[in-house]
Image (spheres, rainbow, N blue to C red):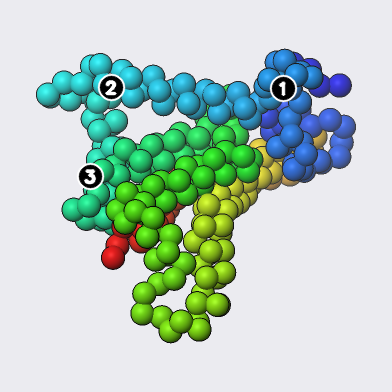
Amino acid sequence: MNTPLSLIVPAYFTATAGNDFTGPSLAGEFDPAPILFAGTPFALNRIILVRLIAVLCLFLIMFLYSRRARLVPGKAQSAVESLLEFSRVQIGEQILGPKAGPYQPFLATLFLGILFMNLTGVIPGLQIAGTSLFGMPLIFGIYAYIGFIVAGVRNSGIKFFRNSLMPPGVPAPLYILMIPIELFSTFILRPITLALRLLVNMVSGHFILVLCFLGTNYLYFTISGAIGVGAGTLTLLAGIVFVVFEIFVAALQAFIFTMLSGVYVLMSISE
């Protein structure tokens, strides 16, 4: 029976039961029991709680930044501005060039939202990314999808859909093939591929961390003697290395997702 602590704290911080090593599973890691409001449509499990914490932290940081911004920034203000500057320069201006201005809020929302959701996977006490279940990556994918469609309609009006499905200059008979292909690739596949790419990277990273720390727990407390201590130390060091690597992956996936969204916007507004 799950205790309240086991509902919140991940498996790799709890003792391994018995003498048999039990690896992580999809059901155990990504289908946690409800913590609050069980049996209602508002049931909160650990992953939903982690997502709410990530959103609250991002909101508080940006709220305090907007209220306390100074001409000469301090360390905290410089850190926030560096993230916004990275989104503006390295993503927006690099991809959209002089047309980037109107789309900076859209791109910054994607970048910061995904980054904060991803980083919860390495924060002590949370230890799971808010994007490690398909729902959250799909929401970001739909947001990106709406963004590039709105950009295309604002730029070209209703002709955006015609130009997307029937590119000018193509022989008329080829439209029989091109229309379903473009419809599927542009208006169906894009948000799904964005979401799946993000999901798979965060799930695999979480499994590696869980496996390392479960192994450390098992070797230290179940396998006695120098072999257990030596092997447990190796898995502990591997876990620490993968924590650093997962921070890099969290930032990289936020960058890639936002960059591809910017590319889709560029394709929508290009003649």
Q: Nearer the viewer, residue 92 or 216?
A: 92
Nearer the N terminus, badge 3 or badge 2? 2
The residue tagged 2 is 65
Label 1 – label 2 distance at C-alpha = 35 Å
| Left or right, 73 with reference to 170 | left
**Residue at 73% from the left image edge and 27% from the top image edge:** 14
**Residue 228 in sight in this render:** no
Element at label 1: loop
Element at label 2: helix
Label 3 – label 2 distance at C-alpha = 21 Å
Q: Residues within 10 Å of mark 1 (few under 14, many from 20)?
A: few
Vertical arrangement, residue 57 with respect to residue 31, above or below: above
The N terminus sits in image quarter = top right
Label 1 – label 3 distance at C-alpha = 40 Å
Element at label 3: helix
**Residue at 52% from the left image edge and 23% from the top image edge:** 53
Q: Quadrant of residue 95?
A: bottom left
The nearer-to-camera label among 1 and 2 is 1
- Number of numbered tags placed on the structure image: 3
| Left or right, 19 with reference to 216 | right
**Residue at 76% from the left image edge and 26% from the top image edge:** 33
Q: Residue furthest left?
A: 71
The C terminus sits in image quarter = bottom left
Vertical arrangement, residue 144 with respect to residue 32, above or below: below
Q: Position of residue 80 (x, y in %)?
A: 29, 30
**Which label was assigned to residue 41?**
1
Amino acid type indicated by mark 2: Tyr
| Left or right, 134 with reference to 97 | right
**Residue 120 in sight in this render:** yes
Q: Position of residue 139 (x, y in %)?
A: 54, 40
The residue tagged 3 is 101
Nearer the N terminus, badge 1 or badge 3? 1
